[in-house]
Amino acid sequence: MLRQIKPRTARSKRVLEKRAPKAVENPKNALFLRGTTCSQVTQDALADLYALRQLHGKRFHKKNAVHPFDDASSLCFFSEKNDCSLLLFGSTSKKRPHTITFTRTFDYKMLDMLEFSLDASTFRSINQFKTKKVPVGTRPLMVFAGTAFESPVPNEFTMAKSMLLDFFRGETSDKIDVEGLQYCVVVTADEPTTTVADDPASKPVLHLRVYQIRTKRSGQKLPRVEVEEQGPRMDFRLGRMQAPDEGMLKEAMRRAKTSEERTKKNISTDTIGDKIGRIHLGKLDLSELQTRKMKGLKRERDPHLLDEDNDGADSAANQAAPSSKKAEKTKRKKI
């Protein structure tokens, strides 16, 4: 159950109404923050991700003594204070260098976490690509390539796909302008090299690339499409993860009931506008079917049988006649 807070002032009432659940939710805000030790490579990676999410994001520059997998209460506090359901925490240690932890919250409580280990040798920032940048707030096309994302069992790769989709989604809309499709985010997963599941080096590497889409004249009806890399370029290895609680995940995935009319089964409308319904019945027993009695459906009798019936009736009448005469004679004698 979601907690309910009674507002005391008009301002707090407006804030609670803004944060209340809606049938169509607002775009998720992302909060970028760093730990006490954070390398320059990790800071540059956070800055590039913030540039892609600048319209719906906040960034902290101060150090925060936070350990997400040990105690996530501080991240829950930051989530509630800044109204952010996505948090990206950058940190560096000897055991886990250049790490970015993606976290998601529901009702300002920790839902799930996943650790992305950045490869510093292959990292390229946006500033290193001398290309024209797309406008802020543009929604990208998302492409996920690799068998690791198609696992039927939830694992770290399916969680990474879900988190990246939430991060780059932005505002929801029912109409799309073709001219607004200006860049594409491609995430590719390599195939595993060994069969050792506990070895982190055997896990597939995630390659994140961002390409700018350009359309040029082709002399035909459809234009010629070209892509050019605009950065950032990141390679990740997935580390620790915290799976979501089943009850909390079910509550977070629940949708509100809207006033839209639901489609009814076996009911359709034809081209004229008449409503047509289809009824499915079981097997009928025709022997018990009640039909209307009509004279034309009665069985005709045989004429020979009718003559025999008349002869039998005459003989019975003749036998009854003398018996009646004897009865009259006996009555006269008594008198």
Image (cartoon, rainbow, N blue to C red):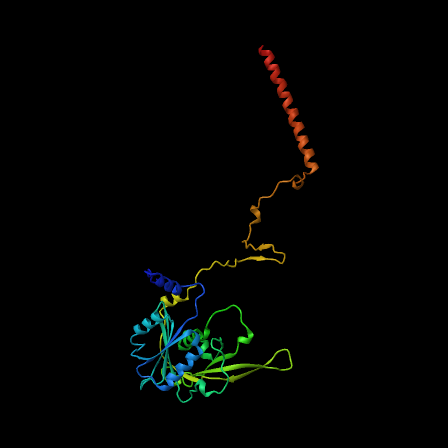
The one nearer the camera, 77 or 209, is 77
Tell me which corner region of the image, top left, top right, bottom left or bottom right, holds residue 19. Answer: bottom left
Tell me which corner region of the image, top left, top right, bottom left or bottom right, holds residue 112. Answer: bottom left
The answer to whether residue 99 of the structure is visible from this angle is: yes
Q: Residue at x 66, y 29 (%)?
A: 313
The one nearer the camera, 88 or 145, is 88
Percent position (x, y) of residue 62?
32, 80
Tell me which corner region of the image, top left, top right, bottom left or bottom right, holds residue 46. Answer: bottom left
> Would residue 306 appear left or right of 19 to someone viewing this image?
right
Q: Residue furthest top?
A: 335
Q: Number of labelled discs?
A: 0
> Would residue 243 appear left or right of 24 to someone viewing this image?
left
Percent position (x, y) of residue 151?
44, 76
Q: Residue furthest bottom?
A: 121
In this rendering, the answer to whether 98 lies above or below 248 is below
Percent position (x, y) of residue 53?
43, 76
Percent position (x, y) of residue 149?
45, 77
Q: Residue at x 55, y 50 (%)?
A: 285
**The C terminus is located in which quarter?**
top right
